[in-house]
């Protein structure tokens, strides 16, 4: 199972490969000798910011195995992403990766990733919370709760999924809302 720290560079690479200048904000520092944590901050509103054709793009990056608990998004992150959208009249983004197996495997738990506009995520989360639930499962196959068979990442976030391409990693499809909103011109296919 990849860690959150593995997922952050993968999302950054995806953005850079598609022409977005990506800057991951420093939220912790480790000693280069003993690798112990020197300092850490949890008050940043999102993990990093991209720039494309002079437009800023805030992105918060999350990772889960088979269910994403909503409390993994801290209150200051919620406020920061919401404020960004309100002040700039532009989308902020949540990149979420779920799954435990290799992205190119045939497994029902292969790693999949979604790049979701923050306002869309909030609507989907509220829909699930309205049913008394506190997390979004990966898919209908990864939950035994009947209600979650229809309220899961596979069904609710499908149109925001990014694709895994063997030689590149994650890639934003031409049809994705991110690509159309920013007018991305760099695309990759699976033909190598």
Image (cartoon, rainbow, N blue to C red):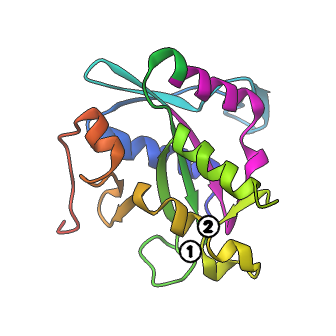
Q: How many marks?
A: 2
* Front residue of 26 and 31: 26
Neighbour class for label 1 at 10 Å: few (<14), some, many (≥20)? Answer: some
Q: Which mark is residue 122?
A: none
Q: Residue furthest right?
A: 132
Rendered residue at 75%/55% (across/down) = 130
Rendered residue at 21%/62% (across/down) = 189
Rendered residue at 19%/65% (across/down) = 192
Q: Position of residue 24 (x, y in %)?
A: 52, 30
Q: Position of residue 67 (x, y in %)?
A: 70, 65
- The reply to whether discs 2 and 1 touch (Cβ–Cβ < 8 Å) is no
Q: Position of residue 143 (x, y in %)?
A: 71, 78
Callout 1: SS: loop
* Front residue of 3 and 160: 160
Cα distance between the residues tagged 2 and 1: 18 Å
Tell which tag, 2 or 1, sits nearer the viewer. Answer: 2
Placement of the N terminus among the 4 image quadrants: bottom right
In the image, is residue 29 part of the stretch drawn in magenta?
Answer: no
Residue 133 relative to residue 112: left or right? right
Rendered residue at 66%/50% (across/down) = 125
Residue 139 relative to residue 79: left or right? left
* Front residue of 41 and 133: 133
**Residue to which mark 1 is pinned:** 101
**Residue to which mark 2 is pinned:** 152
Residue span colored magenta:
59-85
Callout 2: SS: loop
């Amino acid at each position: 199972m990849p860690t959150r720290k593995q997922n952050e560079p993968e999302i950054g690479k995806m953005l850079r490969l598609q022409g977005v200048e990506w800057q991951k904000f420093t939220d912790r520092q480790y000693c280069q000798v003993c690798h112990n944590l020197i300092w850490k901050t949890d008050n940043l509103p999102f993990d990093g910011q991209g720039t494309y054709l002079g437009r800023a793009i805030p992105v918060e990056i999350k990772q889960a195995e088979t269910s994403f608990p909503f409390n993994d998004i801290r209150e200051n992150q919620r406020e920061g992403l919401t404020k960004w959208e309100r002040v700039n009249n532009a989308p902020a983004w949540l990149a979420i990766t779920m799954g435990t197996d290799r992205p190119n495997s045939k497994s029902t738990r292969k790693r999949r990733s979604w790049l979701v506009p923050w306002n869309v995520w909030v609507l989907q989360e509220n829909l699930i919370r309205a049913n008394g639930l506190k997390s979004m499962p990966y898919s209908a196959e990864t939950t035994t709760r009947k209600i979650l068979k229809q309220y899961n990442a596979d069904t609710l976030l499908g149109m925001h999924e990014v694709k895994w391409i063997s030689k590149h990693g994650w890639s934003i499809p031409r049809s994705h809302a991110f690509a159309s909103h920013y007018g991305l011109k760099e695309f990759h296919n699976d033909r190598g």
